[in-house]
Image (tube, rainbow, N blue to C red):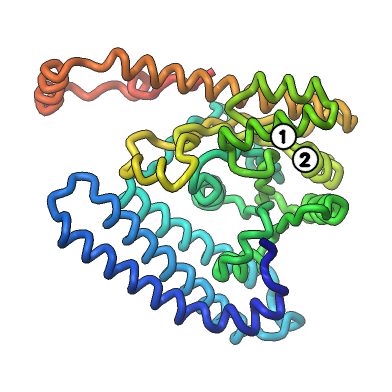
Amino acid sequence: MRPPPVLVRRAVIDPLWPAIATALALCFLLVAAAAAVVAPLTRRRRLVRLALLGALYLAMDAGLVVCCAALWLRHPRASRRDEARWSRRHEELLRRALGILLAASRRLLGFRVEVQEPPDRDQISGHPLLVLARHGGPGDSFALVEMLISRYRRRPAIVLTERLRWDPGMDVLLSRLPSCFVRRGHRDAISARLTQLASEMDRDDAILLFPEGGNWTPGRHRRAIARLTRAGRRQAAADAASNPNVLPAHPTGVLACLAGRGDLNVAVVAHTGLEHLVGPVSIWRAVPVSEPMLVRWWYEPAAALPRRASRQRDWLRLQWAIVDSWIDARKAARVSERSSAPAPEASAAAEHAAELPTEPVPEALASPAPDG
């Protein structure tokens, strides 16, 4: 469902949203309190955890609208603004909001992120970057944006679906930062916008793009294969069927970014750990989550990227096949770890041994080797 026009959002929805969000947050807090009283000894306490996180998100979203309104009241005329300072303040708002949300998710839901980096990651610092990420599981986009801002000190330009304009806080904030809201059926306009974003990038900027165009689910993967088959694209359908952990990557946005900037380095981001959370029931059963969101990324310097559009499409298909293979390997490793888990007696002995003082492990041995 398309969001209302911008005039309706700014003149009607945004002014009302802080009061509405506050009332809804209070309702969530009452639900959490009632759940804590009714089932105080429940180990998982799913309803308490989810209700508290919902209350926090609503309060945070209302706070974003208020803070953005305060910034606008201080600088209502665009012609008199210091654009660099205006952008930095909104970027800081985004960083703080995502930091609070992810910290709360870690405490309440057990959500955590582990990152595996290439050893030579510093070689791409100081250069504009195109980040191509797979999209699978709830909250992965928030985690990746926060990682770009806080861990890598990048100013992200985010490519996201227009449906997220229904979130007033994110709508106002991201509309004031470099971003591209994607609407179906407007391919030429989207390509032009991405080319413009790429051409205007600074040395510490990064465009975050999800080439799959949507969150991976088994149903979407099946529908993607059926759609390609109906269109007569048999090879593409076969490629999609052989890569069950990802959706087919759409090259349009990638090609538009590369066309706008010839010296654009590319980072490919694979992650796993959340893709089995494909609906409310699976999320409910998983809370608190036991597995981390494991992120593995690698990069291609601009000089190594193909220049022809047809070769760039082939390159993107290859990268997505690598992403799929990496996810397969991680899933197999998890299954192996579970099957080789020690018996309860051995686990108790291991826990007892862990409490005993030991010699410190040398740093070189303590650091895990990077995954291939």
In the depicted view, which residue is nearer to us: 114 or 117?
114
Q: CB of mark 2 within 8 Å of CB of mark 1?
A: yes
Residue at 52 percent across and 33 percent down: it is: 271
Judge whether residue 151 can be spotted in this image. Answer: no
Residue at 34 percent across and 55 percent down: it is: 50
Quadrant of residue 38 in the image?
Answer: bottom left
In the depicted view, which residue is nearer to us: 322 or 148?
322
**Secondary-structure class at tag 1:** loop
Residue at 67 percent across and 67 percent down: it is: 3
**Is the residue marked by circle 2 packed among few (<14), some (14-19), or many (20+) residues within 10 Å?**
many
Residue denoted by label 2: 254
Residue at 39 percent across and 21 percent down: it is: 334
Q: Does 287 appear above or below 238?
A: below
x, y percentage for residue 93? 52, 66
What is the total number of numbered labels drawn onto the structure image? 2
Residue denoted by label 1: 249
**Is the residue marked by circle 1 packed among few (<14), some (14-19), or many (20+) residues within 10 Å?**
many
Position of residue 143 in the picture relative to residue 71 (left or right): left
Q: Which mark is residue 60?
A: none
Position of residue 241 in the picture relative to residue 287 (left or right): right
x, y percentage for residue 153? 56, 50
**Secondary-structure class at tag 2:** helix
Q: What amino acid is at disc 1?
A: Ala
Quadrant of residue 229 in the image?
Answer: top right
In the depicted view, which residue is nearer to us: 242 or 96?
242
Q: Earlier in the sequence, mark 2 or mark 1?
A: 1
Quadrant of residue 69 in the image?
Answer: bottom right
Q: What amino acid is at disc 2?
A: Val
x, y percentage for residue 137? 50, 41
In the depicted view, which residue is nearer to us: 37 or 91?
37
Q: Does 62 appear above or below 56?
A: below
